[in-house]
Amino acid sequence: MSAKKPAELSPEGVARSDRKRLAAEEGARALADVERQAIEVRKNMARLREVREAKEAADEALRVASPTPALKKRPRKRRT
């Protein structure tokens, strides 16, 4: 004879299934939060890269546009 499962779960079984369900929901929320933060980080990195590249381009344009200052030769010290 095979034993059939009871139609109603024991209180321990109900508590266990509730804990599993809550853990699965919290895990899904945590993964979604991590993905959202990763997207925000990538957006910020792209923004900072654009700012850096724009600054480098402006610095390069300024360097090319400005004349190079003449270097003065320093007199040599005489040995005594």
Image (tube, rainbow, N blue to C red):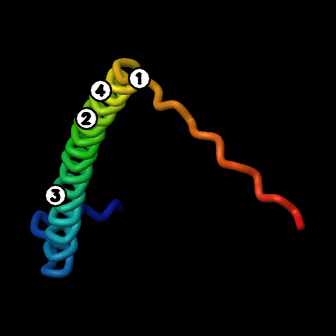
The answer to which image quadrant residue 53 occupies is top left
- First in sequence, mark 3 or 4: give its number: 3
C-alpha gap between disc 1 and disc 2: 26 Å
C-alpha gap between disc 4 and disc 1: 16 Å
The kind of residue on which mark 2 rests is: Val
Tell me the quarter of the image containing the C terminus.
bottom right
- First in sequence, mark 2 or 4: give its number: 2
Q: Residues within 10 Å of mark 3 (few under 14, many from 20)?
A: few
Q: Residues within 10 Å of mark 4 (few under 14, many from 20)?
A: few
Q: Nearer the viewer, residue 5 or 36?
A: 36
In the rendered image, residue 42, in percent from the top left (x then y), is placed at: 28, 39
C-alpha gap between disc 2 and disc 4: 11 Å
78 sits to left or right of 51:
right
> Mark 4 = which residue?
58
Q: Give the foreground label among 1 and 2.
A: 1
Q: Residue at x 22, y 65 (%)?
A: 23
> Mark 2 = which residue?
51
Tell me the quarter of the image containing the N terminus.
bottom left
Q: Give the foreground label among 1 and 3.
A: 1
- Is mark 1 in CB contact (under 8 Å) with mark 3? no
C-alpha gap between disc 1 and disc 3: 65 Å
Q: Residues within 10 Å of mark 1 (few under 14, many from 20)?
A: few
C-alpha gap between disc 3 and disc 2: 39 Å
In the rendered image, residue 20, in percent from the top left (x then y), is placed at: 22, 65
> Mark 3 = which residue?
25
- First in sequence, mark 1 or 2: give its number: 2
- First in sequence, mark 1 or 3: give its number: 3
Q: Residue furthest right?
A: 80
